[in-house]
Amino acid sequence: MRQGVKRTYKVVDVKTKDAEIFPYIMAYIPPLIFRDISKPDIYLPLAVLYGMICLLYMRLDAPYLNPYFLLFGYRIFEAKLEPSRNVVTIIAHHRPISGLEELEMSELSAGAYYCE
């Protein structure tokens, strides 16, 4: 990920957001389980469907709905910054975040931060 200038922020009220993606993924698994995907009239539409789903996940503005972040070791958190108490999204790479921490982060966009 591209990083800007790192600053230290105090974060509180941390909540993980990446667990919310599993209901979305589970909605698409049953067609794979209950179909004979060896026939072209089954696997071609499924391939198109899953290709579209992958593209949509990657283009969503809600990064916590992107399963590829999880696959590559990124965790998504929602937290409040002190002293402003603004709610922000934090993308952390291979790092769990708990409450009441000081983190060195780069601002990606308004309300979105990256932490190694």
Image: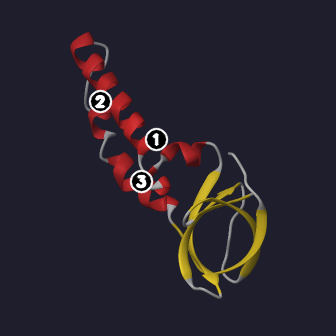
Choose the circle earlier in sequence order: 1 or 2: 2
Choose the circle earlier in sequence order: 2 or 3: 3
SS type, badge 2: helix
Using residue 36 as the reference point, say whether residue 6 is left or right of it: right
In three-dimensional space, the C-alpha distance between marks 2 and 3, rounded to whole angstroms, equals 18 Å
| Amino acid found under the numbered disc labelled 1 | Met
Residue at (57, 85) in percent of width and height: 85
Residue topped by disc 1: 58
SS type, badge 3: helix
Residue topped by disc 3: 22
- Percent of width and height locating residue 9: 73, 76
In three-dimensional space, the C-alpha distance between marks 1 and 2, rounded to whole angstroms, equals 14 Å
Choose the circle earlier in sequence order: 3 or 1: 3
- Percent of width and height locating residue 95: 72, 60
Name the image quarter holding residue 59: top left
Q: Which mark is drawn over residue 15?
A: none
Camera-nearest residue between 105 and 34: 105
Q: Which dot, 3 or 1, sits closer to the camera?
A: 1
Q: Which quadrant does the N terminus fall into? A: top right
- Percent of width and height locating residue 55: 41, 35
In three-dimensional space, the C-alpha distance between marks 3 and 1, rounded to whole angstroms, equals 15 Å
Using residue 109 as the reference point, say whether residue 1 is left or right of it: right
Residue at (27, 34) in percent of width and height: 31
Residue at (67, 75) in percent of width and height: 98
Residue 83 lies, with reference to residue 75, above or below; the image says below
Q: Which mark is drawn over residue 49?
A: 2
SS type, badge 1: helix
Mark 3: few/some/many CA within 10 Å (<14, 14-19, 20+): few
